[in-house]
Image: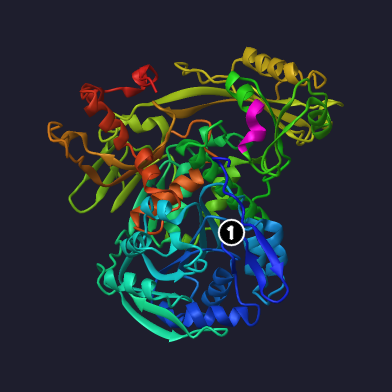
């Protein structure tokens, strides 16, 4: 089995019983009145929709996603009975997802809300392990958690108001009906959480009662005598987050997506940008490429960036479908193996079990046919590879946010220092002028973050990159795919191509170098010699600076107060964070495929909501990982230096 993907569900259709799981020898749903069965077994016993009255954010979890019918019926109920400013997050754990063709055929046989069905099927993810967050609307979010439910819940943040326990028959699917899993379910419940299940097995009832649950029997459905429902009365009360106002420093992609995520939750946001408009610096390139990141082994880093890629793709497609992102295009990417790592990956790609509509290995001949220009080597083909204008994306995500009335932006506002009064953060600019104050501050201003006293120790580095536009010719204007190699070239748009990008450490030159344009063109011609673009004919050249961290994994999370470092002789030492001070930066060359999901995850975690990244990943992204590293190595001096940028590269990964 591929370590990237789950095994798809094995099913068969029985005309007298319906869809049957061959893995568990059980039906997915009763053949007659299946939708009424969902209301009878799950909605009514959990007092839905009544329980949603007055609830700002309702959370519901399901063990066993199956056909998605439970979700679609619940989402339709929510759509009918909620207000636009209420939100529903529905989280479902699934180990063997149905393939999309089977699911599409099946769902079209039911009378369902057409807009919900269409949106869901368009966004249905490939069977790649991890959490797939899908926004069907401003107030309906589905998290599909692909993986073992037990392992997923152990590494999961979030409490739920309602549980649908809908695994297959306990006799054939025992892993979803045991005390260990029930204990994890209880850990993710609060004192008002309710549950229901079709099962009435005695051992299921007893195990739930042993956890302190109140359990009742109710009449079953479709010939079943009884089912179970109840509540987790013995759990702790649910705590509500009181975050009401925030200052976001930096108006690039990270600042824009953070602002949007906060606005969606009703937070008043003040965005401060030192330049004259949004996306002025590294986020200001006219086009950006959305490309998956793969390695031979699907470790945490790779799966995190893959989840980010798929989330970004869904986000941009949704904006494009609404007519709010005209620059989005999906011509696909042909990626040549320009490094030893990529060459080795391409040689084993077929063994990874990734879907062909996600990535496949293609010959030089196929690459030539796909791109409509001669290619000299085999390559990766990414059919979903995309282009977008980052500046337009920043504008679009903010304009489409809920509660835009809570948003204000201020330009030519460079932040010089921060001060916490004990009640709120004050943000100061030139001549000690007060720019803004709020309960929380989010720092997204790339490598400029090291100019602040609270974050001077962060080991980030500015990496110079140059791009340029050059006129198309008769041959190159036929190019139909994005080309990636040790650079990239976009298809012809408005008579020109965009080529990029150089990658230089310790180089802070801001003016473009004509020689670099020629080097970028020569790299392209090595792989596609017939294009013959002219590196000396530049319509536009641009230099910007990516921000990278010491280990190339972004910093996303709460800032540690290094003035309060603990005594490391205590093995159980705890770091002290700055109250309500966070950052999201260091995304390097992968900003488009990580910023939307990582900022959404940060805000979800702050609000103690169900989070679209595992707890272990949130911890790995946190800036405190570097503090722990320094303390472990007895290198506290690195936290006290004035300019960490100079030595960031010297720190081994």
Query: Taking 513 as reference, is 551 above or below it?
Result: below
Whether 351 is among the magenta residues is: yes
Viewer-proximal residue among 9 and 473: 9
How are the colours assigned in the image?
rainbow
Query: Taking 466 as reference, is 202 above or below it?
Result: below
Quadrant assignment for the N terminus: top right
State whether residue 208 appears in this view: yes
| Magenta-colored segment: predominant secondary structure | helix
Could you tell whether 228 is left or right of 570 in the image? Answer: right
Quadrant assignment for the C terminus: top left
Viewer-proximal residue among 255 and 489: 489
In the figure, residue 480 lies in which quadrant? top right
Identify the magenta region: 346-352
Query: Taking 516 as reference, is 297 above or below it?
Result: below
Viewer-proximal residue among 476 and 221: 221
Residue occupied by mark 1: 23
Q: Residue at x 32, y 38 (%)?
A: 429
Q: In the rendering, at what x and y percent does residue 627 appear?
A: 26, 32
Whether 247 is among the magenta residues is: no
Could you tell whether 588 is left or right of 425 in the image? Answer: right
Q: In the rendering, at what x and y percent does residue 295 appear?
A: 55, 31
């Amino acid at each position: 089995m591929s370590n990237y993907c789950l095994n798809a569900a094995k099913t068969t259709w029985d005309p007298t019983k319906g869809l049957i799981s061959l893995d568990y020898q059980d039906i997915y749903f009763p053949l007659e009145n299946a939708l009424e069965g969902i209301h009878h077994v799950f909605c009514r016993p959990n007092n839905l929709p009544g329980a949603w009255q007055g609830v700002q954010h309702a959370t519901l979890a399901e063990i066993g996603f199956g056909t998605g019918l439970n979700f679609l019926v619940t989402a339709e109920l929510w759509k009918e009975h909620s207000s636009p400013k209420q939100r529903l997050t529905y989280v479902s754990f699934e180990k063997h997802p149905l393939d999309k063709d089977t699911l599409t055929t099946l769902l079209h046989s039911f009378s369902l809300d057409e807009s919900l069905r269409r949106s869901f099927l368009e966004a249905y993810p490939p069977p790649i392990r991890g959490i797939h967050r899908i926004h069907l609307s401003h107030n309906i979010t589905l998290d599909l958690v692909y993986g073992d439910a037990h392992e997923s819940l152990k590494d999961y943040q979030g409490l739920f108001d309602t549980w649908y326990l809908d695994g297959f028959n306990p006799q054939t699917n025992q892993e979803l009906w045991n005390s260990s899993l029930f204990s994890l379910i209880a850990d993710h419940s609060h004192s008002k959480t309710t549950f229901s299940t079709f099962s009435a097995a005695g051992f299921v009832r007893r195990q739930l009662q042993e956890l302190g649950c109140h359990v009742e029997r109710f009449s079953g459905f479709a010939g079943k005598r009884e089912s179970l429902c109840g509540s987790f009365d013995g759990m702790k009360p649910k705590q509500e987050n009181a975050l009401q106002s925030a200052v976001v420093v930096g108006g690039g992609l990270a600042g824009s997506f953070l602002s949007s995520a906060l606005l969606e939750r009703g937070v008043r946001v003040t965005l401060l940008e030192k330049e004259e408009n949004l996306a002025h610096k590294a986020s200001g390139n006219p086009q950006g490429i959305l490309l998956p990141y793969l390695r031979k082994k699907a470790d945490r880093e790779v799966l995190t960036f893959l989840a980010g890629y798929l989330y970004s793709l869904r986000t941009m497609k949704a904006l494009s479908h609404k007519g709010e992102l005209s620059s989005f295009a999906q011509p696909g990417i042909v990626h040549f193996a320009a490094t030893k790592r990529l060459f080795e990956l391409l040689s084993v790609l077929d063994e990874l079990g990734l879907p062909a509509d996600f990535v496949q290995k293609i010959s030089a001949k196929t690459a030539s046919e796909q791109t409509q220009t001669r290619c000299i080597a085999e390559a990766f083909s990414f059919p979903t590879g995309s282009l977008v204008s980052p500046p337009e994306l920043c504008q679009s995500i903010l304009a489409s946010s809920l509660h835009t009335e809570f948003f204000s932006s201020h330009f030519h506002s460079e932040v010089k220092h921060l001060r916490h009064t004990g009640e709120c953060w004050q943000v100061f600019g030139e001549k000690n002028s007060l720019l803004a104050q709020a309960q929380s501050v989010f720092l997204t201003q790339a490598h400029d973050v090291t100019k602040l006293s609270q974050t001077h120790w962060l080991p980030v580095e500015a990496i110079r990159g140059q791009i340029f536009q050059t006129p198309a010719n008769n041959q190159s204007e036929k190019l139909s795919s994005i080309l990636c190699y040790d650079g990239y070239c976009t298809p012809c748009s408005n008579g020109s191509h965009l080529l990029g990008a150089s990658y230089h450490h310790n180089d802070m030159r801001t003016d473009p170098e004509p020689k670099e344009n020629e080097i970028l063109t020569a790299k392209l011609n090595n792989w596609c010699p017939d294009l013959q673009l002219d590196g000396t004919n530049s319509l536009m050249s641009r230099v910007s600076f990516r921000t990278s961290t010491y280990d190339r994994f972004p910093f996303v999370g709460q800032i540690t107060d290094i003035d309060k470092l603990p005594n490391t002789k205590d093995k159980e030492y705890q770091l002290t964070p700055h109250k309500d001070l966070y950052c999201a930066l260091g995304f390097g060359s992968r900003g488009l495929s990580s910023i939307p999901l990582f900022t959404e995850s940060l805000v979800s975690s702050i609000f103690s909501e169900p989070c679209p990244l595992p707890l272990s990943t949130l911890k790995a992204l946190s800036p405190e990982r570097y503090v722990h590293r320094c303390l472990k190595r007895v290198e506290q001096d690195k936290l006290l230096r004035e300019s960490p940028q100079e030595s960031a590269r010297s720190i081994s990964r």
